[in-house]
Image (spheres, coloured by chain):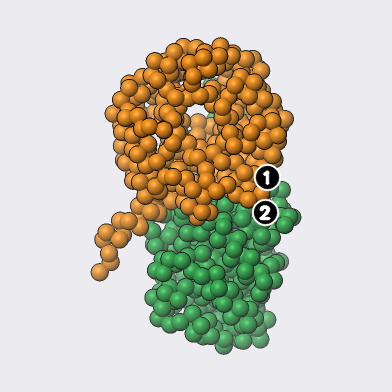
Chain colours: A green, B orange
Amino acid sequence: MALPQSVKIVEVGPRDGLQNEKEFVPTRIKIDLIDRLSAAGFRNVESASFVSPKWVPQMADGAHVMAGIARRPGTIYSVLTPNLRGLEGALAAQADEIVIFGAASEAFSQKNINCSIAESIARFEPVTQAAKAAGLRIRGSVSCSLGCPYQGEVPVASVVDVVERFAALGCDEIDIADTIGVGTPKRTREVFEAVTKVFPRERLSGHFHDTYGQALANIYAALNEGIEIYHASVAGLGGCPYAKGATGNVATEDVLYLMNGLGIETGIDLAQVVAIGDFISTATGKANASRAGKALLAKARSEQTPCV
Amino acid sequence: MALPQSVKIVEVGPRDGLQNEKEFVPTRIKIDLIDRLSAAGFRNVESASFVSPKWVPQMADGAHVMAGIARRPGTIYSVLTPNLRGLEGALAAQADEIVIFGAASEAFSQKNINCSIAESIARFEPVTQAAKAAGLRIRGSVSCSLGCPYQGEVPVASVVDVVERFAALGCDEIDIADTIGVGTPKRTREVFEAVTKVFPRERLSGHFHDTYGQALANIYAALNEGIEIYHASVAGLGGCPYAKGATGNVATEDVLYLMNGLGIETGIDLAQVVAIGDFISTATGKANASRAGKALLAKARSEQTPCV
């Protein structure tokens, strides 16, 4: 199969990335981050989460963030909605897309939300019905698609099953998420080969974490399966809650560098994203986790101060 | 093309990795590192450099390192030899393999050694003749194969030309080296497709740097071209002299994790290598640059102290 000629990069840093930050990131910084990202060319930015602030205090200002950003025409601003209350928040905030989620691992589902996979997804039915009625886009995220911190191996059939359940709920897009970054290219291809049989290839996305350094190899593997949507987090924002000090979401800069090298169109300006990665790393006081970002920043700095 | 069933991993940390360390690493640490690596299953360890100590003070103790290690039967201990004097050192140290090198970039060759590519490789002729006569293996390393810090793009034909010159000198193995880590999978495949036409596939190796985060994607691309030898540096030892603070050699742990996930045999125990990465990072006082290494160390530590 030929590689896609263009891909959509969904920037998840403002939500999936920042969510793991312990120190509260000021609302104005979140707004600034999202506005810089849409200006750099991202057509889809995961921007907030309408989850109880008791669970995720970092996301408590979702309504203010959504109210403060400068909406760029054509850009989809997504928000996470765990329940009907979250959907109310999403509607009030005029989000373009809601994100619902379920694990492909029974052990993860039981441990995290104390119910079966099937039940956890069935609970979203009133949410998706109301979202559809309101004309919102719906994205379903299948966590633990390539492995689980509790049960280890996750059968491909379980991923297919969750994809079918999300499809039945009317999801417009479905993410195959390697939540803990344990996947490698062989399993990535097997999973995408299986799920493309039950859901349209062009509406499936790859959400990879770089915890074991495999994310870019997995993205290259998924490209070879014809997948056209990828998630990434600027400066690699967000760690891994299952391995302290380990890497989380794949860095957007690294993904863009890959796509540029493969001649695959993204519509996003890498140099601008490198600058945004520098901005948010400085603002949060965290080390920039993007290798391409760090290399390009180092190069730019050395060119500004030539050796004498 | 089916992926190889097994690969050889050449561990380059003790030479290519440590060479970039500013702080001198004690000889006994270098010896300990090499012995741990051969015990973990590496069949080829790049161990020292017989280059003038004025150029690379970190490698000044090569003779003592080679004299101090416990030779494991079947393991190839390689040393870098820039000239006949270096070869004398290699012979005295009873190295198994010498490494010679040349750039595929004319600008790099001129800037670094002030002569043309052709001339730089011709200079190795007395070295390779003497090495052959002494029964040593010879490896040729083609630097800047995927890009150059001075001229940028490097033509595929230039890489092929250097490979042919090394082949004519009697090289047993030839490395396609992405010295500054700028390559991506498309160019990686193009280069290997071209060089396999002039040199046996099974004696070509991929030497990737992770400066832009592309190394594992490039290795997966090279596996798809049937390449069976890869270089890696434990804990990602060694930075990038062309971009301060950026990542250097791809980390061995990440490469082994990839191979294990693909079901490709390496003969090397990942858990042992993770422990070696921890040992050398602690000994050098440098952050462990292996993502798989950091994640596996974090996991092991959390299992030792379970949450209560």
Look at the image and tell me in which quarter the C terminus of chain B lies: bottom left
- Residues B23 and B218: in front is B218
> Badge 1 local density, few (<14 within 10 Å), some, or many (20+)?
some
A2 over B96 or under it: above or below: below
Q: For the point 42% across and 45% down, which residue is it?
A: B268
> Badge 2 local density, few (<14 within 10 Å), some, or many (20+)?
some
Q: Estimate the x, y position of residue A92 in percent, counting from the top left.
A: 58, 80
Residue A70 appears in the picture as rendered? no
Q: For the point 30% across and 61% down, which residue is it?
A: B303
A21 over B6 or under it: above or below: below
Q: Estimate the x, y position of residue A274 in percent, counting from the top left.
A: 58, 48
Q: Nearer the viewer, mark 1 or mark 2?
A: 1
Which kind of residue does numbered mark 2 sit on? Ile
Q: Secondary structure at mark 2?
A: loop
Residue A189 appears in the picture as rendered? yes
* Tag count: 2
Residue B186 circle label: 1
Q: Secondary structure at mark 1?
A: helix
Chain of the residue that carries numbered disc 2 in the rendered image: A
A1 lies left or right of A222: right
Which kind of residue does numbered mark 1 sit on? Lys
CB atoms at circles 1 and 2 under 8 Å apart?
no
B27 over A189 or under it: above or below: above
- Residues B162 and A284: in front is B162
Chain of the residue that carries numbered disc 1 in the rendered image: B
- Residues A81 and B269: in front is B269
Do the residues indicated by labels 1 and 2 lie within the same chain of the protein? no
Residue A268 circle label: 2
Residue A90 is drawn in which quadrant? bottom right
Q: Estimate the x, y position of residue B89 in percent, counting from the top left.
A: 42, 15
A143 over A114 or under it: above or below: above
